[in-house]
Structures are given as structure tokens and as C-alpha cells.
Image (cartoon, grey):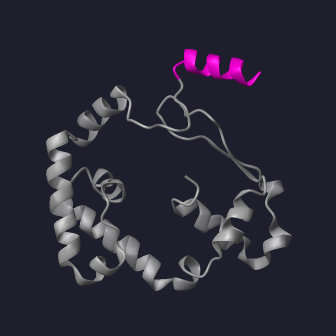
Amino acid sequence: MTAKYEEIMKAKGFLPYNLHTLPAKFIQKAKEELGETDEIRRTALEHFRKRILEDKKLRMYAPTDDAYLIQFLRARKYDVDKAMGLIHNYLNIIISNPGFFDKLDKEKMFKFLSSGFVNVLPFRDNDGCLVVIIKMDSLPWRQYGGNTQIYFQRSSTTRIWW
């Protein structure tokens, strides 16, 4: 059954959950909507990384790998000044709420996410988005007590899933 499902989904043009490279249609979409080209991406990443390393606070907390930084640049259509504002806001939230971001047990987070209340479909939608199904009646409220909301929010706002 699984093999047939995969054949049907691939025949309909759905993309698999794991993408190792960006398909051509999304490269074109990024070019049209964001103005993203290899040259713009390269120069914006260099400029953005340089600005982060010059900033005392960001230098301490912000990762500077391309995959991390590109998220902020794409969200602000490669405007480095706006991306700087976004990363400052993001890190201010994390730094201002250490109990929410730093003190969660990763093993508990993994158990929480593996409890069956959330499922990610093996194929993406036509826009390339992951499809996540959340079964609220399966959410382990009692097991995590008052921290359930924190675990749920934390797991949906970080890269811990993927």
C-alpha cells in the first residue's frame, strides 16, 4: 500500500517530505517574488553575516550558517536592514524568556512530539509546504501538566522537528 501511495503522490507532482535540493519551480518563484538570484543571495548573506558579527549581542547568540540566515533574508526579501531588525526581535524574545526557551528538557520534548498528537504527512502540498496534522484530543495534557502549552508552542516555533 505504501509503495502505491508514493507512486500516486509522485504522479500528481507532490514533493516528498525530505527535499535535498530546491526544485526548479521554487527557484523561479524565489526569483520572481523575492528577487533571489545566486548573486543576490551570496552578497546579502555576506553583508548580513558581517553585520551580525559586528553586533556585540548578535555575535554571542545568533548562528551564522547560511541555512539559518537565509530564513531571515527571505522573510524580508533580501533587505539586510529589515532582516537585522527581524533577527534582533527574534533573539530578544529568546533572551527575554529564558525559562521558555532554555530550560526545556530535550528528551521530554522528543517524547512529547512522539506521543502521537502531531503527524507530518510524507508529501508536501502543491506549494511545497509540509502538511502537519494535530490531533488535539491526543495531546498529552495530563502528562505534562501546566507545561503542555509551553511544550506545544516551543515545538512549533523551533527547528527541533525537522
- Looking at the image, the residue that sits furthest to the right is 142
Taking the spot 53% from the left edge, 62% from the top edge, the residue there is: 157
Taking the spot 36% from the left edge, 32% from the top edge, the residue there is: 26
Vertical comparison of 91 with 6: above or below: below
Residue 82 quadrant: bottom left
The boundaries of the magenta stretch are 1-13
Q: Position of residue 44 (x, y in %)?
A: 17, 54
Vertical comparison of 4 with 123: above or below: above
Lateral position of residue 37 relative to residue 138, left or right = left
> Residue 90 magenta-drawn?
no
Camera-side residue of 115 and 91: 115
Examine the residues drawn in magenta and state their main secondary structure.
helix
> Residue 12 magenta-drawn?
yes
Taking the spot 44% from the left edge, 77% from the top edge, the residue there is: 93
Q: Position of residue 37 (x, y in %)?
A: 19, 39
Q: How many marks?
A: 0
Residue 20 quadrant: top left
Taking the spot 51% from the left edge, 39% from the top edge, the residue there is: 129
Where the N terminus falls, by quadrant? top right
Q: Position of residue 88 (x, y in %)?
A: 32, 74
Lateral position of residue 118 relative to residue 130, left or right = right
